[in-house]
Image (cartoon, rainbow, N blue to C red):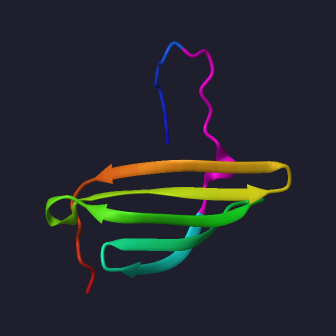
Amino acid sequence: MVENLSLDNPVLERAAELDFSGAGTISGADFSANITAATSSGTLDGSFYGPLVREAGGTFQLSGPDVEYIGSFGATGTVTRLP
């Protein structure tokens, strides 16, 4: 969520239609999921990278009535194995 960010843009708004959830699989260093949002659905695909797989990156696609979203993401951090 973006708050109090200034990029010399008079209006920055959160895109609620991109709040999505989903469930998927991990196979080796790759992951994929079917995702859904309020009025759209699609897929997410990515991979883990870097030393100790502490980085992730990928792409997503959502489509619905009169909309199409295509994007990419990257993250770095600590990976914790769940029991």
**Residue occupying the point 42% across, 64% down:** 46
Q: Residue furthest bottom?
A: 83
The residue lying at 60 percent from left, 60 percent from top is 20
Which quadrant of the figure contains the C terminus?
Answer: bottom left
Q: Along the horizontal axis of the image, is 58 left or right of 67?
A: left
Percent position of residue 44, x then y: 54, 64
Task: Choose between 78 and 25: the one closer to the eye.
Answer: 25
Q: Between residues 38 and 57, which one lies in front from this camera angle?
A: 57
Closer to us: 69 or 77? 69
In magenta, the rendered stretch is: 9-20
Residue found 42% across the figure and 72% down from its top: 31
Decide whether residue 28 is among the magenta residues: no
Q: Quadrant of residue 54?
A: bottom left
Residue 10 covered by magenta stretch: yes
Is 64 on the left-hand or right-hand side of 46? right
Q: Name the quadrant containing residue 65.
A: bottom right
Q: Is residue 10 above or below residue 80?
A: above
Can you give x and y, in whole percent of width and height, for residue 12 in the image? 59, 27
State which quadrant residue 29 falls in. bottom left
